[in-house]
Amino acid sequence: MEIVGSEYGTHPREVLASPEDIDVAFSNITFRTVPQEEKVKREENEHIKNFSDAFAALCVANCELDKEQNYTDDVTGGNVKYNEKRFDNLTNDSVISQIVSDEKIKEVSDKILHVYSEIGLMVMIDGVLCTNQYVVLKIKPMYGTRINGIISLQNTIESTIGMKSLMNVMYKKGYIGILLPIHQFIKKKEDKNPITDE
């Protein structure tokens, strides 16, 4: 038995085991470590779950972008939704945002704006969101441009940018979301900066 002095507290206290006793006790304890195979298996399971979730999200997006499986606007024949609540409060996915190509988003955005300006419809892109399913461009009409005029060009836009789209007209928020497939914007390996590998 040893005594711990006041430097370790306000009152001396008895220690019921000596340092030697503690060493002996710890030498007889087997600490469980996670086997490497178990650790790898856990990581694989987590990867499979993440992949499954992402794959499911992309499958949903693929169905929504397919005009044969989704609602189409009677007037324009386009793939249009109105005030779809699921898209009401979308936020950026921080992980996805890091792997999408800003250059590709800008290129596509410029092509879309050009389509509208060519026929005299004034619109602006008032924000971009990246989710695990879509890149969402928020289109706002300007100078008397009508919503019907914007959605009527959906097929032309798809031909111009070379990808399917879904339009969600958000009347109360004053914009039209153009939803584009996220996989079209993921950076390819060759797009990375050779110096920073980013």
Image: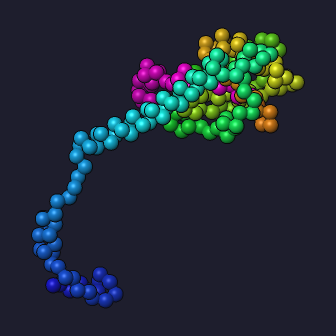
Vertical relation: 170 (above or below) 112:
below
**Residue 194 included in the magenta stretch of the image:** yes
Vertical relation: 137 (above or below) 173:
above
Residue 10 in which image quadrant? bottom left
Residue 111 in view: no
Residue drawn at (23%, 43%) of the image: 36
Vertical relation: 79 (above or below) 88:
above
Q: How many marks on residues?
A: 0
**Residue 184 included in the magenta stretch of the image:** yes
Residue 56 in view: yes
Residue drawn at (45%, 24%) of the image: 192
Picture coordinates of residue 141, whole percent (x, y): 80, 26
Position of 159 compared to 27: left or right?
right
Position of 159 compared to 141: left or right?
left
Residue 152 in which image quadrant? top right
Q: What's drawn in magenta, residue-wise? A: 176-198
Residue drawn at (17%, 84%) of the image: 2
Picture coordinates of residue 139, whole percent (x, y): 74, 27
| Colour basis | rainbow
Residue with the most extreme bottom position? 11
Picture coordinates of residue 133, whole percent (x, y): 57, 29
